[in-house]
Image (cartoon, rainbow, N blue to C red):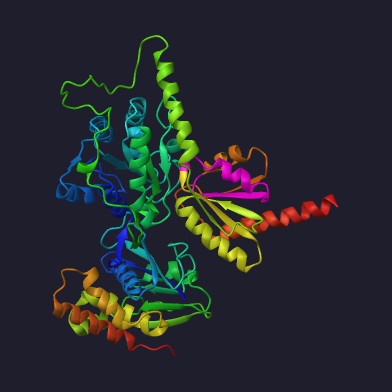
Amino acid sequence: MAEKKLMKGNEALAEGAVRAGCRFFAGYPITPQNEIPEYMSWRLPQAGGAFIQSESEVSAINMVYGAAATGVRCMTSSSSPGMSLKQEGISYAAGADLPIFIGNVMRGGPGLGNIAGAQGDYWQATRGGGHGDYRTFVMAPNSVTEMGNFPHKCFEVGFKYRIPSMVLTDGLIGQMMEPIEFTTPEIDPKTLTEPNWAIGVNKGREKRIAKSYDLREGFLELMVNERVKRYKQIEASEVMYEEKMLEDAEIAIVAYGISARVSVAAMKLAREKGLKVGLFRPITLWPFPKARLVELSKRIKHFLAVEMSLGQMVEDVQLALNGRAEVHLHAKPGASVMTAEEVYKTMDAIVKKGAKEYAAAK
Amino acid sequence: MYQGIRISGFGGQGVISAGYLLAQAGMMEGKEVSFFPAYGAEMRGGTANCSVVVATDEVSTPIVSTPDTVIVFNEPSLAKFEPMVKPGGLLIINSSLVNSKATRKDIKVLYVPCNEIAGELGNAKIMNMVALGAFAAATGAMTIDAIAKALPKVYKKLKPEVIELNVKALKRGAEFKLN
């Protein structure tokens, strides 16, 4: 085994992208994700790729849009306010079926917010963010090791289904250091076959165009419906999640990213105090692991969404369960982190309230 | 075994590098570790703090809200972090710069004149090592030797004689014992 190395989450994401074959990066600085462009600025030239610090977020996303059109594995990254600026470009890439890869290291919002970690961009990431009907494949790592290994999956899914992909993380995971273990294979982009849609030198083959529009009557509908078929395939085969101690659980915490880490501590605390608590961690936020939640609801009657926002992911839990179980929320907005003790108190209240209602019904 | 640590002080006192070093040392000893720097709009002279976890089991959260040990390098950090120490936990105070005493009776307190000792050794920059030495000896969470071995991994450009000086500072810190 190779010697273990301590790495920052942001650096792991950048290295993971390079290992997954990324050879072009364009971005504009913003805290707390600056280690990504900093890392790429020396790492990509070393790997035979190109790094550009653009004049704005808008130009960066459009540079990546152009690079992806040629079939290159490429990436841009930013943090919340910068991600808002990139939304138009993401919509265009989705419309042109281009597999750009995006890293969003979330910070406090709305507006300029602050520079601490937050989870307020869930809706923006999973609902499209930009205009029009489209989806983005979104993964939420909860450790430095996952930061390093998820770009591989994003490029794989992105290129297979021709869809923009995103790692949605936050300033905490971006800044923290943990021992890292890269488990995904290192990809030399020279060994990849050029996609049959990539534009480039036209050596007698049919003309290829990367575009997000079709003005002919009825043709846009065909274009969108063809894309929807791929979305359905992704929903059927690319869902990822993790479960902890759900076998006998009476309450299932649902949390992603850093909130899931705090929730593990809350779960352990609750177990010590005799509450049967388990954890369900969505790893893909779109597609959201709806079917598994429905299965769990046959036995578990209380689901507690724990998130560092006003409550965004909780709506996906509600949509999935559709009234099959009680859905509760422990919300921590404003770029502040919940503690395990706080989450435990919420669960204790749920149990006590349940007991009271039970007694009253008797 | 689980040890959650918070280190706090002025930017420039070596708060962040001390935390990084503890995590590196813990990892090299085969422990599970995490390190999280509070990365506010800190600058030299502002306040900085970090969380470190060294444990035998998987680290659930990297943010240490109830630390087993708190190390404070300056006066404002004492006021902020003393209330957070776990009952029965340890508070290490850099008595060279912190004039106040701890007020809690349910925790162990160790006063270490870090700056003075660093000055005696001839390098003000190694005052954070004095505190880490005291931490290692008082908690037994980690050996001085483990921290010493981690030094060249964290400070890649340090000359051997400077590493040696850091090790001396660790050892001087380890001489401070709890009453």
Q: Position of residue A121 (x, y in %)?
A: 44, 41
* Residue at far right of view: A362
Q: Is residue A153 left or right of residue A54?
A: right
The quarter holding residue A70 reads top left
| Residue A30, above or below B109 | above
Q: Is residue B97 left or right of residue A168?
A: left
Residue, x 48% and y 65% (percent of image)?
B65
> Is residue A136 rendered to the left or right of residue A3?
right
Q: Is residue A272 above or below residue A16?
A: below
Q: In this picture, is A10 found above or below B179?
A: above
Q: Position of residue A134 (x, y in %)?
A: 43, 28
The answer, for residue A50, to whether it is visible in the render is yes
Where's the N terminus of chain A, which quadrant?
Answer: bottom left
Residue visible at 66% across and 50% down in the picture:
A302
Confirm whether the magenta stretch covers residue A308: yes
* Apparent side of residue A316 relative to residue A17 in the rendered image (left or right): right
- Residue A192, relative to residue B165: is it above or below? above
Total label count?
Answer: 0
- Magenta residue span: A285-309
Q: Position of residue A76 (x, y in %)?
A: 28, 40
Image location of residue A281, percent across then percent down:
51, 51
In the image shown, does A138 or A171 lie closer to the viewer?
A: A138
When asked about the image quadrant of residue A130, the answer is top left
